[in-house]
Image (cartoon, rainbow, N blue to C red):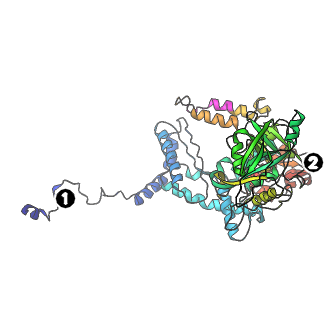
């Protein structure tokens, strides 16, 4: 106890051999908030990046292409991770004998910036569609210009080494002109065409979205079982035919609003179907079921009991087998502007895992629907444009014109509009609704507005992947791309791992024609003229040269600010040509 008392006030540092800290040569703290900016400034003052380039001039090149960030806000942890990992790779290659010229860049076009600028206009009481294109684009350019120097400073503060004084920007006049010029080269191959196709569409943002701009989230949707009366049946005994003509094919869908766009019903040749008659319905319910005793319904055998249960039918009997080949139905709204035949089409996308074994087919509102419609010899011209760019029914949806599918304004923006309810009510009125319910499922949403998307048939511009062209040596673009993939080492040779190569090959081998257009304001325009008489794209080297020269001087904005006649010259009349204003997606 005495020893403890005598040592209680002792300074134990005197018993250790520590370095002398006078003048602070070995500070206890690194002081990084102060030292790091000093180090970055030292690199800048000494021209470190230029010295590295000079020292490595004779070495083999290693180029890391910088997939750029959007110039739309301060950097976040994802930006930091991305740039730091790139910096590690570049510095490592530099120290192992390569000349690594790393040029950072910024993506200044696209939906993130356009959406932010649109928000600013909305706050000022102006809708995007009411703002002239040149004014809107000017605001987008100013917004991106504001963030590039700030992000640049933040990246440099992280110690990322690169050619910061000569960064690239997708909105530079030179870049915009180069993109337009490359597209003109593609146009000359004859692979570019305008077609009609259902695409992922955001009614809130009024534009189509690329796959990378789509996220999936849970959504509760109304489900409906709908009867399509049979009006033509396949060959066979008259008794069987007469029986089928008293029946209805039943479909199931989670998008009631697509019923006005229905043009067919799909089935699978491998599924067994039967014709069922309802014998009894559930009693004592708080509502009267829509199904009636005596109703004759065509269903997949495997799903018949599930459908009857949903419809509150407690007893039914199977009358006979059903062959869907050559069967034709009529639309539930027949006599109300939907007086066309609804054929049954065989498709390999149909299953009997859920639903009824039949797929309601609206070729303007789904990829499978579109594909089977075209594959069975039907025309794109017969696909209706039932929904406009704001997600409202058009006059091609008689009885529903003007109704919103998704609410566009107010506190309920992104919620279901009145379209679903109106269609369901109309089905009840004509006696076509068999049952209804709700389903919580994964549904596509916009990654920017987080509002639900729809599939919408729209005129768009595409690049054909399966059309032979001269510059490809008679091969198709898909064949050329797949051949080039084989030439690249994706890891199959270097790492003996072919997963990445297989992934990119599958993407190219299975993808449809390349959709290149977007209905937006901010981006590089397609910058082509279309003959109003025959729909052909104008291919004229002199016209193309005038467009590119103007873009080099004034950027892509000149496509909107310059009279069309100035580009067309004396050889063509502006009144004879449509100026395509869509942008690259």
- Toward the left, the furthest residue is 2
Query: Within the image, what quadrant is residue 503 found in?
Result: top right
Asked if 471 appears above or below 121 in the picture, the reply is above
Q: Which residue is mark 2?
A: 533
Q: Nearer the viewer, residue 581 or 339?
A: 339
Q: Nearer the viewer, residue 487 or 167?
A: 487
Residue 303 rendering spot, x and y as whole percentages: 70, 42
* Circle 1: element type: helix
Provide the residue span drawn in magenta: 482-491
Name the residue that disc number 1 marks.
Answer: 13
Residue 121, image x, y percentages: 70, 67
Q: Are marks 2 and 1 in contact (CB under 8 Å)?
A: no
Vertical comparison of 239 with 114: above or below? above
Compared across the picture, whether 39 is left or right of 387 comes to left
Q: Residue at x 57, y 53 (%)?
A: 165
Mark 1: give few (<14), some (14-19) or many (20+) Cα within 10 Å. few
* Residue 456 seen in render: yes
């Amino acid at each position: 106890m005495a020893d403890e008392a005598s040592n209680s006030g002792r300074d134990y540092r005197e018993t250790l051999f520590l370095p002398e800290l006078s003048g602070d040569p070995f500070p206890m703290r690194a002081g990084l908030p102060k030292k790091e900016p000093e180090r970055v400034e030292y690199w800048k003052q000494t021209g470190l990046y230029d010295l590295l380039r000079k020292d490595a001039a004779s070495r083999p090149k290693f180029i890391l292409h910088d997939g750029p960030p959007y110039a739309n806000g301060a950097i976040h942890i994802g930006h930091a991770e991305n740039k730091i990992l790139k910096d590690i790779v570049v510095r490592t290659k530099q120290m192992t004998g390569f000349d690594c010229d790393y040029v950072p860049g910024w993506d200044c076009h696209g939906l993130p910036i356009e959406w932010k600028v649109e928000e600013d206009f909305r706050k000022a009481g102006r809708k995007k569609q009411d703002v002239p294109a040149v004014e809107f684009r000017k605001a987008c350019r100013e917004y991106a210009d504001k963030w590039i120097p700030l992000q640049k400073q933040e990246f440099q503060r992280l110690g990322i080494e690169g050619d910061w004084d000569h960064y690239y920007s997708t909105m530079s006049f030179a870049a915009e002109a180069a993109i337009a010029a490359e597209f003109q080269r593609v146009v000359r191959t004859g692979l570019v065409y305008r077609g009609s196709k259902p695409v992922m569409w955001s009614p809130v943002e009024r534009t189509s979205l690329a796959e990378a701009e789509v996220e999936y989230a849970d959504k509760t949707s109304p489900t409906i079982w709908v009867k399509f009366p049979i009006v033509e049946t396949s060959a066979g005994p008259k008794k069987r035919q007469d029986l089928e003509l008293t029946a209805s094919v039943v479909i199931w869908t989670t998008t009631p609003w697509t019923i006005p766009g229905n043009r067919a019903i799909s089935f699978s040749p491998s599924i067994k179907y039967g014709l069922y008659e309802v014998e009894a319905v559930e009693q004592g319910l708080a509502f009267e079921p829509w199904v009636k005793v005596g109703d004759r319904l065509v269903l997949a055998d495997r799903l018949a009991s599930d459908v009857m249960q949903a419809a509150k039918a407690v007893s039914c009997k199977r009358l006979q087998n059903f062959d869907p080949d050559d069967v034709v139905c009529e639309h539930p709204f027949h006599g109300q502007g939907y007086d066309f035949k609804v054929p049954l089409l065989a498709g390999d996308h149909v299953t009997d895992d859920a639903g009824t074994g039949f797929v309601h087919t609206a070729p303007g509102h789904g990829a499978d629907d579109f594909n089977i419609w075209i594959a069975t010899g039907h025309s794109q011209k017969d696909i209706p444009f039932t929904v406009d760019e704001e997600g409202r029914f058009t006059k091609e949806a008689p009885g529903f014109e003007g109704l919103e599918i998704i609410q566009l304004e107010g506190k309920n923006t992104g919620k279901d509009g009145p379209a679903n309810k109106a269609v369901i009510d109309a089905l009840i009125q004509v006696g076509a609704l068999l049952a209804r319910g709700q389903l919580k499922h994964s549904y596509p949403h916009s990654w920017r507005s987080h509002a639900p998307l729809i599939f919408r048939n729209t005129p768009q511009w595409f690049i054909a992947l399966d059309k032979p062209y001269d510059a490809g040596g008679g091969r198709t673009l898909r064949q050329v791309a797949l051949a080039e993939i084989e030439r690249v080492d994706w890891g199959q040779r270097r790492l003996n791992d072919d997963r990445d190569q297989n992934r990119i090959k599958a993407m190219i081998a299975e993808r449809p024609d390349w959709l290149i257009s977007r209905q937006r304001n901010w981006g590089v325009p397609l910058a082509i003229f279309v003959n109003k008489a025959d729909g052909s794209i104008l291919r004229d080297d002199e016209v193309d040269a005038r467009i590119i020269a103007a873009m080099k001087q004034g950027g892509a904005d000149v496509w909107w600010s310059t009279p069309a006649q100035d580009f067309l010259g004396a050889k063509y009349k502006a009144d004879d040509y449509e100026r395509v204003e869509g942008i690259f997606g």
